[in-house]
Every structure is written in structure tokens, then in C-alpha cells.
Image (cartoon, helix red, strand yellow):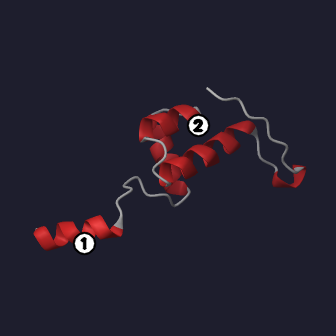
Amino acid sequence: MKNIQLELPDSLNLDESEVKLILAAKLFEQGRLSLGKAAELSGYNKREFTELIGKLNISLFNYPPSELSKDVKNA
């Protein structure tokens, strides 16, 4: 696993766990990490991670609109 060191402005007032959550949530939202891997990266279990991304307005269901349209047509 890669180790990255970041220097963030004090004005952001973020601790390490918040940065991990934000990064994991964004990578999950982009489809670059599975739910399990994102939860692991953030340091939370899947249930906790699911609840936290909901508070960040990130959908648990990462389903492209084009695929949804196809499914509706085929229903």
C-alpha cells in the first residue's frame, strides 16, 4: 500500500480520520474503490461507511444514468 504525506492548511481543521473518509468517499463515488475497500481505507466498517457517505450526499448506488435508462426501457 502506498503511504502519502499531505500538508493541509490549519484553517481546514481536518484530522486524519476525516481526510481518509473524504478520500475514500470520493474514490468510491468515482467507482475507483469498492464499498469494502473504501470502508477499509477510511477506517470504518461497511455499515458505518455507508452511513457516513450518506451524510456527505454520496449515493450508495453508483449507477450511471445511461444504464438506468436502458433498464427502464427493458422493464
Badge 2 element: helix
Q: Residue 10 at what x, y percent from top left? A: 89, 49
What residue is rendered at 69% in x and 44% in y? 19
**Residue 37 appears at what percent x and percent y?**
48, 35
The mark nearer the N terminus, 1 or 2, is 2
Quarter of the image where the N terminus is located: top right
Residue under the point 63% across and 48% down: 22
Question: Which percent across, then down, holds residue 59?
Answer: 43, 58
Q: Is mark 1 on a helix, strand or loop?
A: helix
Task: Indicate the position of residue 12 as horizontal and vertical percent values.
Answer: 82, 54
Amino acid at pointer 1: Ser
Counting every numbered tag in the picture gives 2
Type of amino acid at the residue the image marks with label 2: Ser
Q: In this view, does 47 lie above or below 69?
A: above
Query: Which mark's residue is nearer the viewer, 1 or 2?
Result: 1
The C terminus lies in quadrant: bottom left
Q: Which of 65 and 51 is in front in this view?
A: 65
The structure residue drawn at horizontal position 61% and vertical position 43%, both measured from the top left corner, is 21
The answer to whether residue 50 is above or below residue 63 is above
Residue matched to label 1 = 69
Label 2 Cα crowd, 10 Å radius (few <14 / some 14-19 / many 20+): many
Q: Say if mark 1 contacts mark 2, CB within 8 Å.
A: no
Residue labelled with disc 2 = 42
As drawn, is 71 to the left or to the right of 25? left
Measuring 27% from the left and 67% from the top, which residue is drawn there? Answer: 68
Q: Distance between the Cα atoms at labels 1 and 2?
A: 32 Å
* Left or right, residue 12 beside residue 29: right
- Can you say whether 41 is above or below 26 in the image? above
**Badge 1: few (under 14), some or many (20 or more) residues near its Cα, within 10 Å?**
few
